[in-house]
Amino acid sequence: MEPIRILSEQLTNFAREIIALLPNFLAALLVLALTLLVARFAGLIARKVLTRSKARPSLLAAVASILRLLVWITGFLIAATVVFPNLTPTKLVAGLGIGSIAIGLAFKDIFENFLAGFLILLRKPMRIGDDIECEGLSGTVEEISIRDTFLRKRSGELVIVPNSHLFKNPVKILTDTELRRISLVVGVAYGEDAAAAKDVIESAIQKINSPDAEQPAQVFAVEFNSSSIDFLVRWWAKSAPPDEHVSRNAAVLAIKAALDDAGIEIPFPYRTLTFAEPLALQRDSAGETPPRKG
């Protein structure tokens, strides 16, 4: 019966220790209750302060979450030292240092995206509703969270992009301004009058409805190509991709119609072959079967 007696003594001692720690547990629960109140209050204060600074809603939520997390970590540390008096703050900090290294290695990508998302939210240029391009991805920004950015492609699919991808790579913001300059290359045959062709193209592109009358379209002769003299046509349109497509379509149709009406040729690529010796030409008589080779 000796094992039973030993087990009974161990359970009795354990129960006594638990009872002795009950006041500490109650004090720790009180600390956690106060932590809950402080965390909520800190979140509200952060939202009010950042709202006055006209910060983004996603940034408001991120800062409030970080403050609440810091308050909760502090509250748990205090509660732990209350329950276990022998657990000093120095030991807790040392334990957190070792634990933070292990957690950091395990959740490296998550922390990287979290930090990148926070920095992106601090940036002013990229906003909800902007059209962007980044490393083959393009679309409209629908949401910027603390970890991911939600991108709606032109074809309708939703792409969830890790924030670290947008932070590490160059991002082209197509709608950073209301207007964007569009370029188009138009080729005219060498046999045509280049100056007259330039005037025709200028007249055609000026008829396109420009959103900014103070910035007229421009036409420049830029290159002697293999089968044409190339003109660079530049004009302003609204920056959203759908508006660019509509404006480019109108410009191409207007320039093509104007050149056709003026009788100016838009050449297609062709190649002239020159042989060192004249080729022997032979015409077969009607009904005569040509000789077979071989």
Image (cartoon, grey):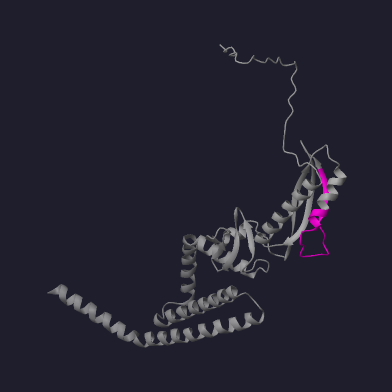
Can you give x and y, in whole percent of width and height, for residue 257 in the image? 75, 50
Q: Quadrant of residue 134?
A: bottom right
Instruction: Depth check: give the residue in front, 187 or 100.
Output: 187
Image quadrant in which the C terminus is located? top right
Q: Residue, x 69% and y 54% (percent of image)?
A: 249
**Residue furthest out toward the left:** 1
User: Magenta stretch?
Assistant: 203-222
Camera-nearest residue between 14 and 109: 109
The image shows residue 236 at horizontal and vertical percentages of 76, 60
Quadrant where the N terminus is found in the figure = bottom left
Res 176 → quadrant = bottom right
Query: Which residue is drawn at the image coordinates 74% and 61% (left, top)?
Result: 237
Residue at horizontal 47 percent and vertical 84 percent from the top: 36
Could you say where residue 51 lies in the image, as x and y percent from the top left?
Answer: 63, 81
In this picture, is 284 found above or below 72? above
Left or right: where does residue 196 sit relative to residue 146? right
Which residue is at 78% across, 50% downward?
Answer: 258
Whether 232 is among the magenta residues is no
Nearer the observer, 13 or 18: 18
With 98 as the anchor, is 220 left or right in this view? right
Residue 216 colored in magenta in the image: yes
Q: Is residue 286 left or right of residue 195?
A: left
- In percent of width and height, residue 34 lies at 47, 87
Residue 131, quarter of picture: bottom right
